[in-house]
Image (cartoon, rainbow, N blue to C red):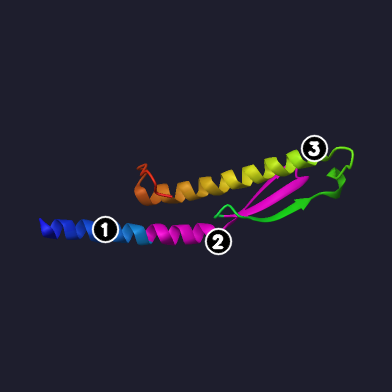
Amino acid sequence: MAKGLGNMMKQAQQMQQKMARIQEEVAKQEIEASAGGGMVTVVVNGKQEVLSIKIDPNVVDPQDVDMLQDLILVATNEAVRKSQDIMQQEMSKLTGGMNIPGLF
């Protein structure tokens, strides 16, 4: 009985190490998304941190700041969503598709 528990603990520790390694690898990735046909491009990393925002000068219209703000918002949300999807896909590979609450 104690040996079985020891094996389970060892497996849990190995899975935790693999999860940490995956999170580290995904955190280094750069994910890009754009809006307005490429007028605004946002790059985030795997930790959902915004790394850069590029704005095409043609979309900068002092009379329509709302549109620019909307494009930035759409591109940022899409980049973050893609980053989260990548993390979820990588973790799913580790867990064999099992949904483990609180995994990340």
Q: Earlier in the sequence, mark 1 or mark 2?
A: 1
Q: Which residue is at the front of the view, 31 or 48?
A: 48
Give the Cα separation between the discs numbered 3 and 1. Answer: 52 Å
Left of 15 or right of it: where is 66? Answer: right
Quadrant that contains the N terminus? bottom left
Work out whether residue 67 or residue 14 is closer to the camera in this orientation and state it: 67
Q: Which mark is residue 66?
A: 3
Residue 28, labelled with which disc?
Answer: 2
Residue 72 sits in quarter:
top right
Callout 1: SS: helix
Q: Which numbered dot is residue 69? A: none
For the residues marked 3 and 2, what is the alpha-carbon distance in whole angstroms?
A: 32 Å
For label 2, count other residues whose C-alpha is less than 10 Å away and answer few (under 14), some (14-19) or many (20+).
few
| Residue in view at x 28 percent, y 57 percent | 12
Residue that numbered label 1 is attached to: 11
Name which residue lies at 82% across and 49% down: 56
| Amino acid on which disc 3 is placed | Asp
- First of labels 3, 2 by sequence position: 2
Q: CA distance from mark 1 to mark 2?
A: 26 Å
Residue 20 lies, in percent from the top left, at 42, 60
Residue bounds of the magenta highlight = 18-45
The single residue placed furthest to the left in the displayed view is 1
Q: Quadrant of residue 3?
A: bottom left
Foreground label between 3 and 1 = 3
Where residue 34 appears, x then y in whole percent? 70, 45
Q: Secondary structure at mark 2?
A: helix
Q: Amino acid at mark 1?
A: Gln
Q: Position of residue 31 (x, y in %)?
A: 61, 52
Q: Would residue 67 be visible to someone looking at this image?
A: yes
Indicate left or right for 22 with 58 as reference.
Answer: left
| Label 3 or label 1, whichever comes before in sequence order | 1
